[in-house]
Every structure is written in C-alpha cells, then in structure tokens.
Image: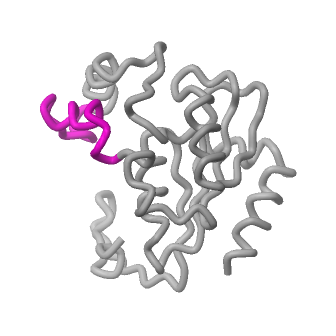
C-alpha cells in the first residue's frame, strides 16, 4: 500500500499516475483474499470484502491441491507470478500469507466475507469456521461455485449489503 503514493507508470501509454487515497477499500478474492485480510489492521484500510477468499492454506481443497495449483499458476499466468517451488511451499507450512495463523494481524470488524457452500476451489467449511471464530461477517450462498467480484454486479441486493457494510466503517 505504501507504493500507491509513489506512483506508477501505465504499461500501455507510458503515462505516470500517483494515487493519494483518502480511504482504501480492498476487494480481495480467492488467492488475494489473505492479502486483504492481513492488511485489515492497517489504519488506512476502511474495509475488506473477501470473495471466495482463502483463509487457511493448510485446509486446501481436494479439487485444487497446492502442488497442482503451483503448476497451474505457472502455466496460466506465466511471469505474472514469479515464485520458486521452495517459496510456494511456504504456503503449505501454514505460517506465511495465512489468515488463520495470524489472528493478531486481522481486524474482524473491517472484514466481510462472501462465499458459496459449493465452492470446490476454496472449500466452505474452513471459511465458515474462521469467520465464526473471529467474529467476521459472512454472507453465504448455497450455490455459486468459486465466486468472483462479478457477483456484485449480478446481485444488486448483495451490492447494497456490501455498500452498507462499507458505509458503517467510514
């Protein structure tokens, strides 16, 4: 987050941009879910909306085991994820980038999780247990699979709930 105010260059146009936000609202999905949750205690963060977010790397899904996921990520994203197998294996050990292992770094009052019970990529039971144990708001859908941010466009009532959640934290 510190890099936002230093600015960045648009790869296509070469134009430089600098962002100095008055508030930061993080929408963190799937693999990015831990990043959002682990930043929730930062005073610059107003709210975190986690969609199909991983909460425990030691409770991986049978559909996407971590070893398989490593190969998939390398194939699907190429240099978008530059990580060695040794670094990837830190996820398996459960201390790195893992919300359940770092409750002291999480502000549950700033987090709202959205998850489907039939998600085969990030299974629901660990998410429900984590949310319950930490007092995190959880919006559950019976069906939907591995949800993405597009659910906010498809379900206006959900977007209104998210907007109210964010507004209460301002």
> Which sits in the foreground, 66 or 94?
94
List x then y, in percent, for residue 88.
22, 34
- The residue shown at (57%, 20%) is 120
Q: Magenta stretch: residue 79 in it?
A: yes
Give the prevailing secondary structure in the magenta stretch: helix
The percent coordinates of residue 37 (x first, y second) are: 48, 56
Query: Residue 57: horizontal and vertical position, in percent?
Result: 39, 34
Rendering quarter of residue 140: top right
Image quarter for residue 47? Answer: bottom right
**Residue shown at the point (42%, 62%) measured from the top left:** 104
In the image, 48: left or right of 142? left
Residue 16 inside the magenta-drawn segment: no
Magenta residues, as a range? 78-97
Please name the residue shown 33% across and 23% down the image. Answer: 66
Res 162 → quadrant:
bottom right
96 left or right of 124 in image:
left
């Amino acid at each position: 987050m510190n890099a936002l105010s230093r600015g960045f260059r648009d790869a296509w146009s070469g134009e430089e941009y600098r962002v100095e936000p008055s508030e930061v609202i993080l929408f963190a999905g799937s693999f990015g879910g831990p990043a959002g949750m682990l930043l929730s205690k930062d005073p610059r963060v107003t709210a975190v909306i986690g969609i199909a977010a991983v909460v425990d790397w030691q409770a991986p899904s049978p559909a996407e085991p971590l070893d398989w996921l490593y190969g998939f990520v390398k194939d699907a994203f190429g240099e978008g994820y530059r990580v060695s197998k040794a670094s990837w294996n830190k996820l398996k050990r459960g201390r790195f980038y893992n919300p359940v292992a770092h409750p002291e770094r999480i502000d549950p009052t700033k987090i709202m999780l959205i998850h489907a019970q039939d998600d085969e990529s990030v299974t629901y039971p660990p998410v429900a247990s984590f949310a319950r144990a930490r007092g995190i708001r959880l919006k559950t859908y019976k069906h939907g699979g591995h949800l993405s941010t597009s659910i906010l466009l498809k379900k206006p009532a959900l977007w209104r709930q998210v907007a109210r959640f964010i507004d209460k934290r301002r």
